[in-house]
Image: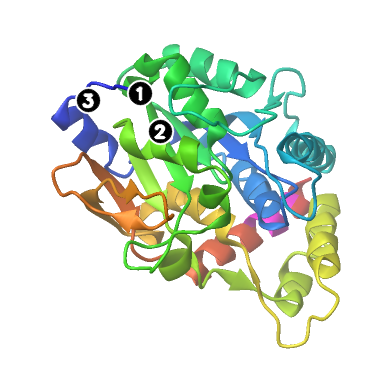
Amino acid sequence: MDFAPLDPQQLEDRLNPPSAPVRMVLDTDTYNEIDDQFAVVYSLLSSERMRVEALYAAPFHNSRSAEAGDGMEKSYDEIHRLLDRLSFLDLPRSGFVHRGAEEWMRDTNGPVGSDSAADLIEKALASLLDDPLYVVAIGAITNVASALLLEPAIRERIVVVWLGGHARHWPDTREFNLYQDPTASRVVLDCGVPLVRFPCMGVVSHLHTTLPEVAAHVKGRGAIGDYLYEIYRDYREDQFAYSKQIWDIAPVGWLVSPGWAPMERVSAPILTEQLTWDFDESRHKVACARYVDRDSILRDLFSKLGRAAAEG
């Protein structure tokens, strides 16, 4: 992997929060747990700030999947279950949802081909230099890293917004999206693409909600609201004094209102073999969230669900 640096001013400009509505694709391991579903719905209900051009199914492997490719297929199916309940949006069903990689990237020079990577390349190359495509990734990042390796020119036409890893001060960065896909993570961190990163522990880790809150503000908001309530309710049997992280809505909230996630410019962190951070201040800059406004983001999501139910 050998990428020439981007023009410093171009990189600086791309790391600024968008001031106008953006074109966006969402790369999501939708069936991994339940917060991706909230993020998919939130992005599709936020057309005033983003035009979602595609949804990409990302691989994952945990107790809800047999292996990475199975996780991707289950995510692909889950996306369609969400779209079935969002029929009032009249979204395209052909060419809108794409299968992603069936395995992890194993080598930083070895992209994993997929429909998602091919579609990302096509959409990015069709983008104007002054109208970049925002690539919001809320899962393992093999699809995005593979597209960057297959066509490095897309670095000049995209901004990657990734929920991955922990905060710079955290003792490790063994966060689910990153630690199951470390090779692809290194590609994205090292290649110089404009990157806006949302760390989990230490930054978005307080973005939680509870069953009573979801029952009050999500349940009864149409078929999609009832579905989100049901998957939250069924995710854990014991809900006593329990709150569930809904971290994946944070990047969408930033695109809706950048003030809800203030950023700082820092050197791109180096991912060590021990899955910790190392730092070299001479490396290219990335934007890194240092806080998220949990209440404003959830208030916006709940309000949009209510309006959608009333209008749909």
Q: Main secondary structure of the magenta part?
A: helix
Callout 3: 10 Å neighbours few (<14), some, many (20+)?
some
The quadrant where residue 106 appears: top right
CA gap, disc 1 to disc 2? 8 Å
Q: Which mark is residue 1?
A: 1
| Residue 67 vertical placement versus 107 (above, below) | below
Which quarter of the figure has residue 14? top left
Q: Which residue in the protein does label 3 denote?
A: 6
Comparing labels 3 and 1, the label whose residue is closer to the camera: 1
- For the residues labelled 2 and 3, the Cα–Cα distance comes to 15 Å
Q: Quadrant of residue 52?
A: top right
Q: Which residue is mark 2?
A: 187
Label annotation for residue 71: none
**Stretch of the chain drawn in magenta:** 304-308
Q: Secondary structure at mark 3?
A: loop
Separation (CA) of disc 3 from disc 1: 15 Å
Looking at the rendered structure, the kind of residue marked 3 is: Leu
Q: Amino acid at mark 1?
A: Met
Q: Are marks 1 and 2 in contact (CB under 8 Å)?
A: yes
Q: Residue placed at 75% from the left, 47% from the top? A: 31
Pick the front one: 18 or 28: 28
In the rendered image, the quadrant that contains the N terminus is: top left
